[in-house]
Amino acid sequence: MSEAFSSEVFLAYSTYSTIVLLKMLLMGPLTGYFRLTRKVFANPEDARAHGGKDEETSKKFLRIDPDVERVRRCHQNDLENIVPFVGIGLLYALSGPDLSTAVMHFRIFAASRIFHSIAYLVPLPQPSRGLSWMVGLGVTFSMAYRVLKAGVHL
Amino acid sequence: MSEAFSSEVFLAYSTYSTIVLLKMLLMGPLTGYFRLTRKVFANPEDARAHGGKDEETSKKFLRIDPDVERVRRCHQNDLENIVPFVGIGLLYALSGPDLSTAVMHFRIFAASRIFHSIAYLVPLPQPSRGLSWMVGLGVTFSMAYRVLKAGVHL
Amino acid sequence: MSEAFSSEVFLAYSTYSTIVLLKMLLMGPLTGYFRLTRKVFANPEDARAHGGKDEETSKKFLRIDPDVERVRRCHQNDLENIVPFVGIGLLYALSGPDLSTAVMHFRIFAASRIFHSIAYLVPLPQPSRGLSWMVGLGVTFSMAYRVLKAGVHL
């Protein structure tokens, strides 16, 4: 096994990064599930494959559905927030933080993003979703601050 | 040269990650090509720059085109799937997998994503695109499983 | 502190990656600012939270606004270009480039993306935005070329 994995901080980064990336990836099949069960497609070839051979019916399935759009917005928010966490988190894990501080950052981020998805998809009344988004953002900013404090080369 | 590049598994990760990221990047110029040749723009300043000085004509170019939207959906699907591959793949490459197993993962992923883009842009009838998407997803899940099996710190 | 941070090239990568990822992250709060000040929401629960208890008013706020869409397109362009830079840039930093060449790549990329956002949001007349996008793309292609030249395992 590689040296990287012998560091506890890196192992924690690896664990939480994988968890949040898997959570993000699952939004894809979830979109697919809503598209298939509600017969809501973006591509004519998808509508044809799932709407029978009737041309009229298949055209009707090329539509926009509020629930599908909601899952897509949730997925997009993951892309906008989880991807920077994974990038900045790697640098943070390599910058030599305290294990307990690092694990606290990762835990709070993962919890905030899982709660964010629940708040988006249920949906829970605001400001629950807004706050969970801000908590995740705060964790990433805190890690970025630590990375830049550990060393800068401009 | 760095130590990382002296590991064959890391070299394979580096090669395939670069290939799929370049493939994803090329969707940008492809969108631009369709926008310019079909005169389909999202911003008034773009329509003005490519539609002459006539205000009427330039406004007509602010429109939605099915082919441009198709390229954009293909690009979005790349973001949703290739980015997690690059993140989880890095951890996988560092987790000490067999070289042959790792290379097989990377090859199948790259092939599935290149085929996915072809299936999206031609377009090929379903389920060709859906299956290639699932194969790519399966590879990333398999790597994530290996990463978590190699070590977890919660 | 980790060994990775003892390399000047890696330190430069860390600095510029963090800068461009923070720049990308800031598009989120900017979108939120426009949504809140202009009362333009994508979710009914957001409109309710910020539009008072009146059902009629809250429904009116579920709309599309050209300025919000502009910020979102700018954010999307960042995702499409900054994320590949972070991925390919990591491999590039580990491939053993000259420090001065590497720093030049990172500086040009960061400058081009900051200028791109300004050109998008002001907005500046074309081709200012288009050129800054191409410069950023060129830097990433140049790094990818160096990564593949440093070693390939297919």
Image (tube, coloured by chain):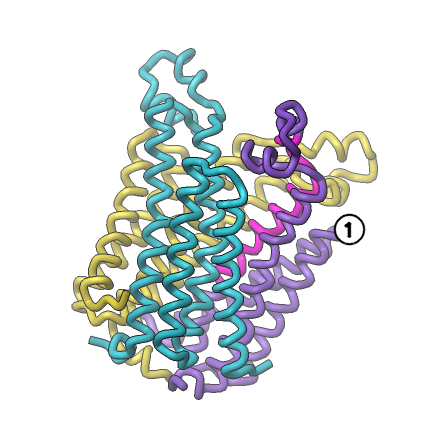
Chain colours: A cyan, B yellow, C purple
Q: In this view, does C1 lie to the left or right of C113?
A: left
Q: Which residue is drawn at 61% across and 54% down?
A: C27
Q: Check disc 1 and report the residue beneath it.
A: C125
Is residue B39 visible in this depiction of the protein? no
Q: Position of residue B90 (x, y in %)?
A: 33, 66
Q: Which chain carries label 1?
A: C
Q: Where is residue B26 in the image (x, y as percent from the top left)?
A: 49, 52
Note whether C141 is above or below C102 in the view shown.
above
- The secondary element bearing badge 1 is classed as loop
In the rendered structure, which segment of residues is drawn in magenta? C61-84
* Displayed quadrant of residue A31: top left
Q: Position of residue A38 (x, y in %)?
A: 37, 23
Q: Where is residue B27 in the image (x, y as percent from the top left)?
A: 49, 48
* Displayed quadrant of residue B56: top right
The question of residue C83 being in magenta is answered with yes
* Displayed quadrant of residue B149: bottom left
